[in-house]
Amino acid sequence: MTATPLLSAAALIYRRDLLLAVRHWGQAAQPLMFFAMVTTLFPLALGPNLDDLREIAGGILWVAALLASLIGVELLFRADHADGTLEQMMVSGQPLAMLALAKGAAHWTVCGLPLVLISPLIASGLGVPSAAICTLMLSIGLGTGILSALGAIGSALTLGLRRGSLLLSLLVLPLAMPALIFGARAIDMAIHGESARGPLLLLTAMLMLAVTLAPPAVAAALRISAE
Amino acid sequence: MSWIWFHKLASPPHGYRIAGSLAAWFGWPAFILIIAGLYGGLVLAPADYQQGDAFRIVYVHAPSAWLSMFIYGTMAVAAAVGLVWRIKLAHAVAAASAPVGASFTFLALVTGAIWGKPMWGTWWVWDARLTSELLLLFLYAGVMALRASIDDRDRADRASAVLAIVGIVNLPIIHYSVYWWNTLHQESTLTKIGKPSMAGEMLWPLLVMLLGFTLYYGAVLMVRLRAEILRRERDASWLRTGAGS
Amino acid sequence: MNEFFAMGGYAAFVWPCFLLAAIVLVWNVVAARRLLNAAQNRVLRSIDTGKGRR
């Protein structure tokens, strides 16, 4: 029997996860709903004045996206761990890091991408001008990618633990703060008409770093948690 | 090259004995240095031109901040050694170091905030260094919380090791980001804490305190390490044959 | 002497810092020793109860 080439194995995992998410689309929609609700909290709490909201829109959007990503990431490995699929992946002979990368990519497609797509709608509710929308989507897109990677590490470390989701948030939030700083700043700059290239480039660099370094860390954490 | 000495060091009965003597070798010099540093800083050093006597807080703030980072680094290195070479003693060092490091991070934060009040007028300012220390405290909290949540000691060791390593990789990124973020939002040029131009008589007590604190950590680590070793080796036979007092 | 304690008017800030530092330094030592004592006692107790078996 010939071994499955690595890319096919990865693609298989990716497609499988997407399919599972589509079947349980209610669960997959939770981060999206959370994002919408949290961003609504702020006008309710601070008043409907769009000029005021516009000043802090970048921060609101980013914090909401950050929290929504945390909600989504906890389920990354849980189902597979419960039904034994994870163990199968670990003994499959394929590099676990690549499979983790595939799962992470699927997770972003299901949780992060919808946030990116809905962000223009939410942002206009906070007074963000349409000229800033492109930067906004880029910032949220890069950011949720970073968060998927960091969240995967946290999820792998806390696999199967009681109160794992709370612990997961505590572990991931400090690591996510640099991305938050630059991501929110990028949106802010765009709102004020400045070019946000600096922060966006930094976000891209962070994403590259995350995509390269997180999969091995996730693989190590999975082996530690599942053995 | 014979690595026997290395593996001997890593064997628990040896580690236990050596830690015992090292504790005293670190502890007494630490005590003397700290007393000397306190005297030099509180009594001998002249008051600062800008900050008056308030600058003397640096003699506890700076060593705490230094220790908070040094200990995290030690913890991460020990964690890496434990993961890669599977040396249990290294994991014990990491486990023993975390609470100590967290306590100094806390001390650095509080002394920094107190120092800020007469200088900047408020109890808390989002100064780059203070914010960095706060994030460091969160990182410590994460490592300790993770270790505490896992019952299986082996899994706890290795999981918190991975987290500590992820944390140390992130630390430069966090430092840089927070620094950048702070310069961006700073409205006025504030007197930066810890940067009065240090005359010699102000500087030497600081260096003495830094060294004293570091040796102090060494001593405390040795004591905690012995406790960790005993806890982990509970059923081992070398305990029965009368290991050191 | 009074001048020393007054710390140029900053006494309310300087002394609490040093006091807190002293507390942290003392606490670390006390806690470490307590942990070691507890661990040593546990070992001694287990040796004692084990002696009967030998």
Image (cartoon, rainbow, N blue to C red):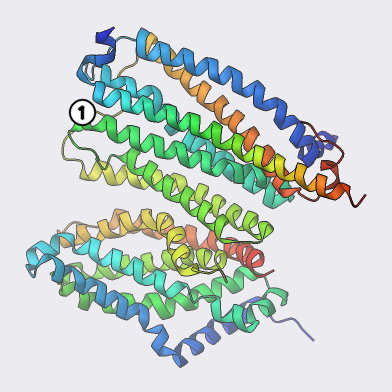
Quadrant housing the C terminus of chain A? bottom right
Q: Which residue is pictured at 30% across the width and 29% down the height?
A: B193
Which residue is at the front of the view, B46 or B76? B46
**How far across and down, in percent of the image, does residue B88 sit?**
72, 48
Extreme residue in the bottom direction: A23
Q: Which chain carries label 1?
A: B
Q: How many C-alpha atoms fall within 10 Å of the one at disc 1: few (<14), some, or many (≥20)?
A: some
Image quarter of the N terminus of chain A: bottom right
Rendered image quadrant of residue B242: top right
Classify mark 1: helix, strand or loop: helix
Q: In the rendered view, would you say C46 is above or below B189?
A: below
**Could you tell whether A118 is left or right of A85 in the image?**
left
Q: Can residue A129 be seen in this view?
A: no
Residue A151 position within the rendered picture, expressed as x and y whole percent measured from the top left: 47, 66
Left or right, B4 with respect to B115, comes to right
Name above or below for residue B101 compared with residue B203.
Answer: below
Q: Which of C41 and A25 is in front in this view?
A: C41
* Looking at the image, residue A200 lies above or below residue C51: below
- Residue C45 vs residue B31, the one in the foreground: C45
- The residue where tag 1 is placed is B118
Name the amino acid type tagged 1: Pro
Q: Position of residue B177 (x, y in %)?
A: 35, 47
Q: Position of residue B59 (x, y in %)?
A: 39, 22
- Res A184 → quadrant: bottom left
